[in-house]
Amino acid sequence: QVQLVQSGAEVKKPGASVKVSCKASGYSFTSYYLHWVRQAPGQGLEWMGIINPSAGSTSYAQNFQGRLTMTRDTSTSTVYMELSSLRSEDTAVYFCGRGLTVFGVVTPILDSWGQGTVVAVSS
Amino acid sequence: ETVMTQSPATLSVSPGERGTLSCRASQSVGSNLAWYQQKPGQAPKLLIYGASTRATGIPARFSGSGSGTEFTLTISSLQSEDFAVYYCQQYNNWPPEVTFGPGTKVDIK
């Protein structure tokens, strides 16, 4: 079955960077785009960006331009999300999710999710 | 940016009853709307996409309707495992715009 397994919790100081991994299994890694979504404590969901695991191309939400980098390693079926210049407002649970392709169109409809990674930013 | 609102913020329902959740978009999103269920400490789970298409494995008691700016998620007979928070998501102007609603919590009456 489809599984997305994320790396463990992180505690970072303001100004630092964090890199979270998401390892995919149970399907063809290069056939589905992967997204990152975050959820601040007690808050809703915020879409961050997308990576094409085949080509490595990315697209990021405007709010994260300049601070967010997504990469992939096809040899291990793993995608990475790195967020830099961390501030307290970046404290959240970060999820990776697999995007559906509907009638041949890539979409941000997420049909499988990782378990989430807590990132806490505190001095 | 398309702003999504959901009502009510909390819906109190008895098991076996019908639950109706609303989602409104600040501008038309066509049928480019999905619904997710999230339980405490878990990742969201896809229920509905394209406003009315059930995702794989989702029971028939979940149904979605609407288009444009007004959408509804209906749970025909609430089961104990359905008590959770439900989010709508629009993707009409993606890429790059994707926005989620603030959620509706369905709890036990």
Image (cartoon, rainbow, N blue to C red):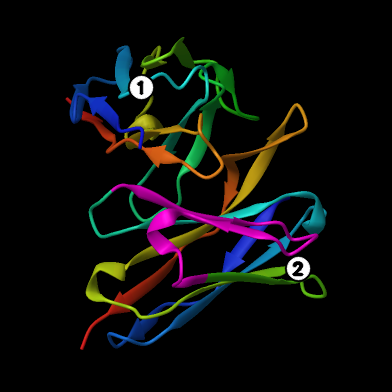
Q: Name the residue under label 2.
A: A77
Residue count near mark 2 (Cα–Cα under 10 Å), binned few <14, some 14–19, many ≥20? some
| In the image, residue A63 lies in the stretch drawn in magenta | yes
The total number of labels drawn is: 2
Residue count near mark 1 (Cα–Cα under 10 Å), binned few <14, some 14–19, many ≥20? some
Q: Nearer the viewer, residue A66 or B85?
A: A66
Q: Mark 1 and mark 2: span between their CA atoms?
A: 38 Å
Q: Name the chain under label 1.
A: B
**Quadrant for the N terminus of chain B in the image:** top left
The mark lying in front, picked from 1 and 2, is 1
Residue B25 on image: x %, y %: 34, 24
Q: Do the residues labelled 1 and 2 touch (CB within 8 Å)?
A: no
Give the amino acid type for the residue marked by disc 2 in the picture. Answer: Ser
**Quadrant for the C terminus of chain B in the image:** top left
Tell me, yes or no, whether dots 1 and 2 are on the same chain: no
Helix, strand, or loop for circle 2?
loop
**Which residue is found at the position 27% from the left and 38% from the top?**
B102
Q: Is residue A18 above or below residue A81?
A: below
Residue B54 on image: x %, y %: 58, 22
Helix, strand, or loop for circle 1?
loop
Q: Name the chain under label 2.
A: A
Residue A63 on image: x %, y %: 38, 58
| In the image, residue A108 lies in the stretch drawn in magenta | no
* Residue range highlighted in magenta: A44-68
B37 left or right, relative to B20: right
Residue A22 on image: x %, y %: 61, 67
Q: Is residue A71 above or below residue B97?
A: below
Give the amino acid type for the residue marked by disc 1 in the picture. Answer: Gln
The image's mark for residue B27 is 1
Dividing the picture into quadrants, the one containing residue B6 is top left
